[in-house]
Image: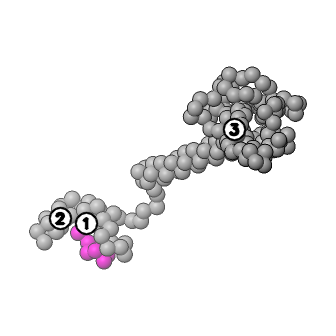
Amino acid sequence: MLGVLMLDNLKTVTRDPFLASLTTPADDRQGQPGNWRRGTRNAMTIVEVMVAVAVIVIAALGSLNYEYLCVDHVRIARAQLAATRIGQLLLEDWKSTGGSSEYDPEDLAIGFNPDTPWGDYKTVIDGLPFFIGLSQDDVDRDDVAGVTLRRIDVSVRWRKDFSYGSPDNDDPAVNLSTYVRLDQ
C-alpha cells in the first residue's frame, strides 16, 4: 500500500504516463491482469527472433546429418549386397564342380584376378575393390561308403572406407559356406 501511495504521489508530480499506468487498478490495464505495459504487443523481440533462428538452424543441421547417414548406409548396403552376390556366385559355381581342389574362379572370365596380397582373388564392382578368399576342409570321411564330406568357404572382404588397398582384419566381410559330397 505504501508503494502505491508513493507512486501515486510521483504520478501527480511528474505526470508521466508510464507511472500513471502503474497506479491504475489491474482490471483497467488493457483487460489483462498483470500487464505493466501500456498498449498491446504487436512485434517480436530480438530474443524471440534469435530463439526461432536457433531452432530452425538446429532442425536444418539435424536433417543434413540424417541425409549424410542415409547416403553412408546406402553405400554400406550396396557393398554388402555386392559381396553377398559375389560369394553366392563363387560358392554355387565351386559347388557345381563337386568342390574340386582345382577350382579357379578366373575360368569364369568375369573379372576375378588372381594373386592378391590378402586373398586368392580380387575384383572391382562399381569402383569398389573386393578381395575373395577360398578355402576347403574335409570334415568327415566314411571309408565303407567311400564318401568324403567337404566344407567349402568363400570370404569376400572390402575396406570399410571404400578405398583401394588390402583390407584389414576389422574391415567388413561376407563369409559363406556349404558342404559337398565327394564320391570316390
Residue kind at label 1, given as amino acid type: Leu
Q: Give the quadrant of the C terminus.
A: top right
In this picture, residue 111 sits left or right of residue 81? right
Q: Which mark is residue 22?
A: 1
Q: Which residue is drawn at 72% across and 34% down?
A: 134
Q: How crowded is mark 2: few (under 14 residues within 10 Å), some or many (20 or more)?
A: some
Residue 107 quadrant? top right
Say which label, 2 or 1, has the lower sequence index. Answer: 2
Horizontal and vertical percent position of residue 179: 74, 47
**Circle 1 sits in a helix, a strand or a loop, which is it?**
helix
Q: Tell me, yes or no, whether the two marked residues, 2 and 1, touch with CB atoms within 8 Å.
A: yes
Horizontal and vertical percent position of residue 74: 68, 45
Find the distance from the CA under tag 2 to the CA under tag 3.
99 Å
User: In this figure, which residue is indicated by the disc labeled 2?
Assistant: 7
User: In this figure, which residue is indicated by the disc labeled 3?
Assistant: 137
Q: Residue at x 59, y 29 (%)?
A: 168
Find the distance from the CA under tag 2 to the CA under tag 1.
8 Å
Horizontal and vertical percent position of residue 149: 73, 45
Whether residue 80 appears in this view of the structure is: no
**In this rendering, is residue 63 above or below 2?**
above
Say which label, 3 or 1, has the lower sequence index. Answer: 1
Q: Which residue is drawn at 81% across and 31% down?
A: 102
Along the line of sight, the residue nearer the viewer: 92 or 17: 92
Say which label, 2 or 3, has the lower sequence index. Answer: 2
Residue kind at label 2, given as amino acid type: Leu
Q: Residue at x 45, y 56 (%)?
A: 44
Task: Report the span colored magenta.
Answer: 22-28
Horizontal and vertical percent position of residue 68: 62, 42
In this picture, residue 179 sits left or right of residue 49? right
**Circle 2 sits in a helix, a strand or a loop, which is it?**
helix
Magenta part, dominant SS: helix
